[in-house]
Image (tube, grey):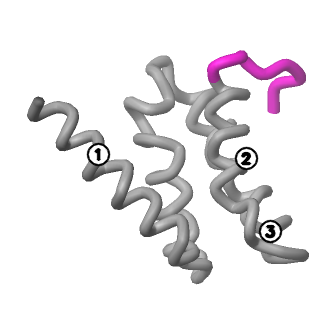
Amino acid sequence: MPTTIDPAVATYLETALEEIAEVQGDARQELAEAIEEAILEVAEESEGNLEEVLGEPSDFVAELRAASGFGPSAGRVRKRRFQRLRSTISQQT
């Protein structure tokens, strides 16, 4: 793994880790390690923007959580749905 992280990668990673803020203890540590490992691996192998490869950090983390058995919290799901709805409405106006 690189000793220095590209600022764009660091920002993506930080945003992704915010998505698991409510997870506690060992589960949070496991998820954080999986998220960091996946993001750094993709960043190293990819020449493109992480969002182009992985999608939005919230979507990437939601997929990873679902695959690992840690579904998103209900509050986060509602927040994302609201944000998507608000975005759709603003694009139409």
Q: Which mark is residue 65?
A: none
Q: Earlier in the sequence, mark 3 or mark 1?
A: 3
Q: Amino acid type of disc 3? A: Arg
Q: Within 10 angstroms of label 2, few (less than 14), some, or many (20 or more) residues?
A: some
Image coordinates of residue 7 in percent, x first then y, are: 71, 17
Give the mark nearer the N terminus: 1 vs 2: 2
Q: Earlier in the sequence, mark 3 or mark 2?
A: 3
Q: Main secondary structure of the magenta part?
A: loop
Residue drawn where x is 51% and y is 77% of the image: 74
The residue that mark 2 highlights is 36
From the viewer's perspective, tell me whether residue 89 is left or right of residue 46. Answer: left
- Label 1 crowd (10 A; few <14 / some 14-19 / many >=20): few
Q: Give the Cα separation between the discs numbered 3 and 1.
A: 30 Å
Q: Which residue is mark 1?
A: 86
Position in image of residue 68 (x %, y %): 59, 76
In the drawing, does residue 64 fall left or right of residue 33? left
* Mark 3, residue position: 28
Q: Which residues are magenta?
A: 1-8
Q: Secondary structure at mark 3?
A: helix
Is 88 in the magenta? no
Q: Residue furthest front?
A: 93
